[in-house]
Structures are given as C-alpha cells and as structure tokens.
Image (cartoon, rainbow, N blue to C red):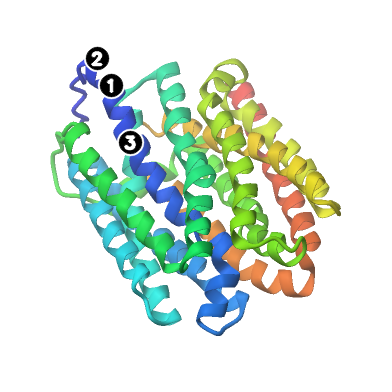
C-alpha cells in the first residue's frame, strides 16, 4: 500500500487550509458549547448539573468509541469522502440536539454528533500530514488546530449569549448552521485523496503497525493524561463562574472569549515555537507551566486573578496540544489516520473520564480539589515527555 502523493496546486493550498479550518472550528464549537450551558440545561430538564454534564460524556463516548473504528479507513480510502460523511453525520446530530425534548434524547443526539466528529477529525489531521511536510506541516497543523481555540472564543460565547436571550436549544441551531456552511466549503475546496492500496482493510494490521512505533505510542499516552487533567478544569469552569462568581450565562461567555483568543494565538503560532524548541521540548515546557497555572487557579479568590491564570493556561495549552499532535503526525508515517484516530479517541476518553470523575470530585472536593488534581496530571505529562525526549536523544 502506498499513499497517493499527488501535489495540490500551490494556489489551492490556502483554500485547503481554510476548508479544514472551518471543519475543525464547527467540531470544536459543538464540543465546547456545553460547558457554559450546564446550569441552564439542568434547569430546563429539572435535573442536576451533574446529570446535565452527561451531555459532555455522551459526546465524548461517541468520539472515543468511534475513532478507533473509523481511523484506519483513512489509511485505505479517499479522505475527502470520509470527511464529507463525518460532517454530515455530525450535522444530523447537532440538529437533533436542537429539538431534543428530554435529557435522554439529548444524550443520544450528542452521541450521534460525537460519532460524526470521530469520523471527521482524525482525517483532518491525516490530510495535513499527507499534503504538507516538515516545517510547513507543523505550521499548518498549528493554524488548523487554532480553529479549536477560535471555536471557544467565538462559538461558545455566541451560543451562551443566544441561550441567555432566548433558549439554550438555539445554541445548537447556531452550531448546525455553521456545520452546514463547513460541509459546503468542504465539498468545494478539499481535493480528492484516494489511496493506492492493495489487499483488504485489516484493522489488526493497522494497529499492530502502530503499536511498533514506540515514540507515537508514548506520545498517545501523554495525550490521555494531558487531556484528562485539562478537562477536569474546563468542564466545570462555566459552572464555577456562575455559582462562585455570580455571573450569568452571557457574562461567563466573555471569560471563554479571553481564554479562546489567548489559546487561538498560541495555537496559530505553535508551529513557529515547535520549529525552534522541537515538539517534545515544547510539550515538556508547556506541561510544567500548565501545572503551575492549575495551582494558581486553585487559589484564585477573585475574578481578575482567575482570568489571569486562565490566560496563561490558554497560551500553554495552545502550544502544548499542537505539539502533541504534530509529533504524532510527524512520526506515524502511513498510519497517520489510525494514529490520529487513536489520539482523538484518547483525547475524548480523557474528557469522558474527567466529566465522570469531575462530577463526583466537584461535589466532594470542589473546584480547588479538581485544580490540584489537574496540576498533578500536567506535571506527570511534562515529566513523561522529558523522559521520552531524553530517550530519543540517546537513540540518536
């Protein structure tokens, strides 16, 4: 099996990046839209915030369960068709969320949307690895990953504002509209990328090949630890802003704007940082600084202090998560789709575990306890990346 490496005309490269950026943006907006809406959703369905947080878990389970199944398909079939199918499924789930009359139905629709995202995002990252090489790949990876940050800065506050002015269902209608635009742009701008493969699809072979890549497997483990720690804080940030600092839904959305814009800038220029520090050193540095930020958040008694620590955390997350993905793509070879599917699955497994553990931890330990747990996980991720970097230096 070999990849079809036909070059995209240079004039179309920018359009390709725009198309992928929009797809990632809409997936990110739907993924993060729940956080500031949990108290409102809980009141609407006459349930608790802990029960409403299962909407986060359902989306994450759909992604974590679907990504390993869909990922290897991108190493065999036309990535454009897979991207189009994934966006369509995601769009259907978002529309159904907008009309969900009960919490169980909402959870099922979130599961559908998560499965659609599982089919889409791994092939976005694999497409970047296929079409761009070396420093250009790192730069494009940073730009497209910045779409996740922009979705926080624009999509989530917009959805929160819409919910504040009318009804929280409108947030999902807004997500559906953006999803439709992304699907149209995808069909128009992303080129066909058929694979020249011989022989039938073998999941066992794809995962055995991936397992032999020690550097990639180790980085995947760091991703799981990293995202578990991050989502322990992020899933309940909107709830803390409303309950502890007495902000309404729209006001809490402005905090996400500051976080998202800071994260967006860091992700956008993440390629520049990686070209100078290297991906593993970037992961080490940002992991340790993120641990310090989590401690700072744990003891933030005022809103300005909390916002200050969030901005620093956002910058480090933008650099660190981009470096994790770029390191995997750079070392996964022809197993990029499979590797990034596993990476995405672990990312959402981290979200799933964080929402479950965090739901109990928030009730028993409070937000401070969750922040201190996050500090430990970020510190562990940074230390593991440092060990991997030292091992790589010895190997060379």
Circle 2 SS class = helix
Asked if the residue at tag 1 contacts the one at tag 3, i.e. Cβ–Cβ closer than 8 Å, the answer is: no
- Disc 2 crowd rating (10 Å Cα; few below 14, some 14-19, many 20+) is few
Residue 341: give x, y in percent of width and height: 38, 48
Q: Are marks 1 and 2 in contact (CB under 8 Å)?
A: yes
> Outermost residue, bottom direction?
46
Whole-angstrom CA distance, mark 3 to mark 2, is 16 Å
Marks 3 and 2: CB-CB under 8 Å? no
Residue 166 appears at what percent x and percent y? 46, 66
Q: Between residues 364 and 335, which one lies in front from this camera angle?
A: 364
Residue at point 74% right, 61% down? 370
Does residue 292 appear to the left or right of 113 in the view shown?
A: right
Q: Is residue 347 left or right of residue 233?
A: left
Using the rendered image of the protein, determine whether residue 228 is visible from the camera's viewpoint.
Answer: no
Q: Nearer the viewer, residue 380 or 373?
A: 373
293 to the left or right of 54: right
Location of mark 3 (residue):
20
For residue 13, the mark is: 1
Total numbered labels = 3
| Badge number at residue 10 | 2
- Secondary structure at numbered mark 1: helix
Q: Quadrant of residue 222?
A: top right
Q: Please tell me which of labels 3 and 2 falls first in the chain.
A: 2
Dot 3 falls on a residue whose secondary structure is helix
């Amino acid at each position: 099996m070999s990849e079809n490496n036909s070059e995209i005309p240079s004039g179309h490269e920018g359009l390709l990046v725009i198309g992928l950026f929009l797809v990632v943006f809409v997936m990110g907006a739907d993924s993060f839209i729940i956080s500031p809406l949990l108290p409102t959703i809980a009141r609407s369905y006459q349930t608790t915030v802990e029960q409403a947080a299962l909407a986060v878990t359902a989306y994450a389970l759909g992604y974590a369960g679907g990504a390993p199944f869909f990922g290897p398909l991108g190493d065999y079939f036309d990535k454009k068709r897979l991207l189009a199918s994934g966006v369509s499924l995601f769009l259907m789930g978002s529309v159904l969320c907008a009309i969900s009359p009960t919490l169980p139905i909402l959870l099922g629709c979130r599961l559908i949307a998560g499965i659609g995202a599982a089919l889409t995002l791994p092939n976005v990252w694999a497409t970047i690895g296929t079409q761009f090489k070396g420093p250009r790949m790192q730069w494009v990876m940073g730009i497209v990953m910045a779409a996740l940050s922009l979705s926080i800065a624009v999509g989530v506050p917009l959805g929160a504002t819409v919910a504040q002015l009318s009804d929280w269902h409108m947030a999902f209608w807004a997500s559906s509209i953006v999803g439709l635009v992304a699907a149209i742009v995808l069909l128009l701008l992303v080129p066909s990328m058929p694979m020249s493969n011989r022989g039938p699809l073998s999941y066992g072979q794809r995962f055995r090949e991936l397992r032999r890549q020690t550097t990639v497997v180790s980085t995947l483990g760091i991703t799981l630890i990293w995202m578990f720690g991050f989502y322990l804080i992020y899933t309940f940030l909107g709830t803390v802003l409303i309950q502890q600092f007495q902000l309404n839904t729209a006001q809490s959305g402005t905090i996400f704007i500051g976080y998202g814009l800071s994260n967006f800038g860091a992700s956008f220029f993440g390629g520049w940082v990686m070209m100078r520090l290297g991906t593993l050193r970037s992961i080490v540095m940002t992991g340790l600084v993120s641990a310090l930020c989590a401690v700072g958040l744990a003891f933030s008694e005022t809103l300005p202090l909390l916002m200050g620590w969030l901005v620093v955390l956002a910058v480090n997350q933008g650099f660190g998560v981009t470096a994790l993905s770029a390191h995997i793509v750079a070392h996964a070879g022809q197993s990029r789709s499979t590797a990034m599917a596993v990476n995405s699955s672990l990312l959402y497994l981290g979200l799933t575990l964080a929402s479950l553990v965090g739901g109990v931890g928030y009730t028993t330990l409070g937000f401070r306890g969750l922040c201190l747990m996050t500090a430990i996980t970020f510190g562990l991720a940074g230390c593991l990346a440092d060990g991997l970097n030292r091992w790589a230096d010895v190997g060379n």
